[in-house]
Image (tube, rainbow, N blue to C red):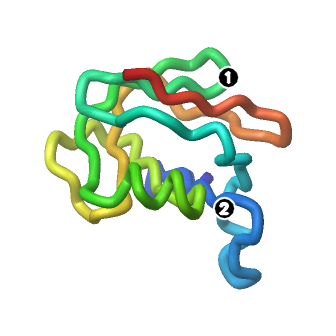
Amino acid sequence: MINAANMLILFGQGAPADLADFCYTIDNKQVSGSISVGGQLVIDQMAYDITAVGAVVEKNLAQLGHITISFDGSTASSLPGTLHVKGKGLPQVRQGSLVQIFA
């Protein structure tokens, strides 16, 4: 979690070594369905409304397990691989945390 920027970077197994220290490694083998505005991101029972979806979020998540989650509530995507959400507080991501996206 990059607290100063209110961002969380997810990466599947095999993240590049220079990024590994800044990423939360996920198992992206069960990725299916679409991600859209109005859906929810849930991290360990903390729910966040999806406000914007970058153009390559679905593709990057399915192929690489890699997206950036921005907790800024923006309704316009800043970068193609960024998922924007809004909610109360920032998650305390740790080993074993469950990250889910619901349509």
If you read the primary sequence from the N terminus, does the residue marked by circle 2 or circle 1 appear first?
2
Residue for point 70% across, 80% down: 16
Corner quadrant of residue 85: top left
Along the line of sight, which residue is nearer the eye, 84 or 27?
A: 27
Rendered residue at 54%/34% (across/down): 90
Name the residue rendered at 46%, 56% in the picture: 68
Given contact means CB atoms under 8 Å apart, are the residues at marks 2 and 1 in contact? no
Residue 50 point in image, percent of width and height: 32, 31
Q: Which mark is residue 20?
A: none
Neighbours of disc 1 within 10 Å: few (<14), some (14-19), many (20+): some
Q: Which amino acid type is shown beneath numbered disc 2?
A: Cys
Image position, residue 24 (x, y; %): 69, 54
**Residue designated by label 1:** 44
Query: What is the CA distance from the residue labelled 2 to the residue labelled 1?
Result: 17 Å
Residue shown at the point (75%, 70%) measured from the top left: 14
- Comparing 96 with 74, the one in front is 96
46 displayed left or right of 73: right
For residue 98, above or below residue 26: above
Residue 46 x %, y %? 57, 19
Secondary structure of residue under mark 2? loop
Report which residue position mark 2 lands on.
23
Q: Amino acid at mark 1?
A: Asp
Residue 54 vs 87, above or below: the answer is below
Q: Quadrant for residue 39, please give it.
A: top left
Q: Could you say which is closer to the camera, residue 96 or residue 32?
A: 32
How many residues crowd mark 2 within 10 Å: few (<14), some (14–19), many (20+)?
Answer: many
Could you say whether the residue bearing mark 1 is in a helix, strand or loop? loop
